[in-house]
Image: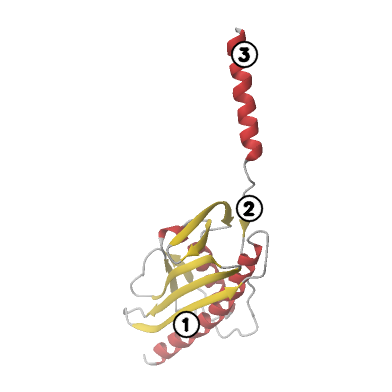
């Protein structure tokens, strides 16, 4: 191997090492939500329910989103959620519904299923919004509960803007979104069970 080739190889290896060393570390954040299990009622194994979550494409990916204006959204390359927001929502909804003991057969699906209750969710916001020197978490969710016959028996729109504590990373966002989503899910689980119980009583 001649000297020129050796010099080229050394240069390439050095460049690769420098490039790797300069890359920022990837940070992964998760939600931390706990449910009160003391409000459990009688399970109804004959009433299955399907959870469906729709969302914009960027919320079906794990990368965190940062909104700097109403017109601009930045997808962060090195800060990620443990799972995509749409997946986290579906999984947390499943846990929230299980926690009241009313349902035993809860499934997550990509589309509304016929002949079963379907809890359809449209997740429209799950992001950080910087406004001046303050940061907020934005969480917006439309919920529709469809009966096995396709009738909409419950609808609500949930929206929260959470002031975030100062943080050098996105831990404050994860904490704020956990608290906001927990509040929503507690209301959704109760409303879902109540709407289904009322609908079943008509039969």
| Nearer-N-terminus badge (2/3) | 3
In which quarter of the view is residue 151 placed? bottom left
* Residue lying at the far front of the rendered structure: 132
Give the answer, above or below, for where 175 lies relative to 73: below
- Identify the mark at residue 87; answer none if there is no mark: none
- Identify the mark at residue 27; answer none if there is no mark: 2
Q: Nearer the viewer, residue 64 or 143?
A: 64
Q: How is the image coloured?
A: secondary structure
| Nearer-N-terminus badge (1/3) | 3
* Residue lying at the far bottom of the rendered structure: 202
- Residue at 65% across, 63% down: 171
Report whether 34 appears left or right of 181.
Answer: right
Residue position for label 3: 6
Closer to the observer: label 2 or label 1? 2
- Residue at 47% across, 60% down: 73
Q: Name the element at disc 3.
A: helix
Q: Residues within 10 Å of mark 3 (few under 14, many from 20)?
A: few
């Amino acid at each position: 191997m001649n000297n020129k080739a050796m010099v080229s190889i050394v240069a390439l290896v050095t460049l690769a090492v420098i490039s790797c060393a300069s890359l920022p570390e990837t940070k992964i954040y998760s939600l931390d939500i706990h449910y009160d299990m003391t409000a459990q009622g009688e399970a109804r194994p004959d009433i299955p329910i399907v959870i469906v979550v729709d969302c914009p494409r960027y919320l079906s990916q794990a990368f965190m989103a940062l909104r700097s204006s109403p017109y601009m959204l930045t997808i962060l390359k090195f800060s990620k959620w443990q799972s995509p927001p749409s997946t986290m929502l579906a999984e947390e909804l499943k846990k929230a519904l299980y926690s009241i003991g009313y349902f035993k057969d809860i499934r997550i699906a990509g589309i509304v299923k016929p002949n079963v209750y379907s809890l359809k969710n449209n997740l429209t916001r799950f992001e950080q919004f910087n406004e001046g020197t303050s940061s907020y978490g934005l969480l917006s969710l439309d919920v529709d509960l469809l009966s096995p016959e396709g009738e909409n028996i419950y609808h609500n729109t949930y929206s929260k803007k959470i002031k975030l504590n100062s943080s050098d990373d996105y831990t404050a966002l994860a904490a704020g979104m956990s608290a906001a989503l927990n509040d929503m899910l507690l209301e959704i689980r109760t409303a879902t069970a109540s709407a289904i119980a009322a609908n079943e009583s008509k039969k």
